[in-house]
Image (cartoon, rainbow, N blue to C red):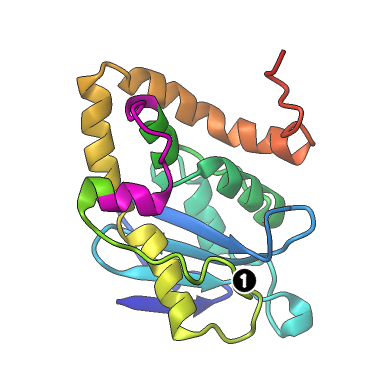
Amino acid sequence: MIHLHRHDLPEGLDLGPMVAIDTETMGLNPHRDRLCLVQLSAGDGDAHLVQIVPPGLGGHGADCPRLKRLLADPATTKLFHFARFDCAALKLHLGVTVAPVVCTKVASKLVRTFTDRHGLKDLCKELLGVEISKQQQSSDWGAPELTSEQMAYAASDVLHLHALWARLEGLLRREGRLDLAQECFRFLPTRGALDLLGYADPDILAH
């Protein structure tokens, strides 16, 4: 089931010790393109979509205390696919350092070295046998009213992350790379902060 919330998560919602999270923005430049939607799932088949509406459109902007408290909670692991971008966007627009995090894209790159296909759609198909659509990936996420197609797309980005992580964690253990993955995950919020400072290109870690 998909639950749409405007401005913040509802009071009393418990999403458990590990919550899958994704974001939708107006584009891929966080300094230019505003944060529009934050999707969350406890891995139970439900998705909670928090629509971030700017004050000029009748919303509260980044004033979403319950969401921000969850993102910063050290007792809750935040599960992403491509956490680098989401951590940067959430840091810039909500003013919160998201931690601790797990990233299924990083995990896939560490253990699925036989392929260069590490996108969410590819992982869902190859590891879970689930087909997800990316048809709404490029759409107007800043619209005051989201379509049912947009909401279904946004939900699909978080509904399968727990199952994906279970498969990938098993592969990391099998290949002896779980500790290495965890060190990478710890660095991701910092990697996002570096991107915001302009160190995406050239990469500060490059020669």
**On the rendered structure, is 181 left or right of 23?**
left
Q: Residue at x 59, y 68 (%)?
A: 138
Q: How many marks?
A: 1
Residue 151's spot in the image, x, y percent? 45, 76
Residue 203's spot in the image, x, y percent? 71, 26
Residue 200's spot in the image, x, y percent? 72, 34
Is residue 151 a member of the stretch shown in magenta? no
Q: Amino acid at mark 1?
A: Ile
Task: State the extent of the magenta-drawn residues as a range.
Answer: 110-125
Q: What is the quadrant of the C terminus in the image? A: top right
Front residue of 192 and 120? 120
Residue 136's spot in the image, x, y percent? 51, 71
- Quadrant of residue 166 within the rendered picture: top left
Q: Residue at x 28, y 26 (%)?
A: 172
Front residue of 175 and 8? 175
Q: Residue at x 71, y 32 (%)?
A: 194
Residue to which mark 1 is pinned: 52
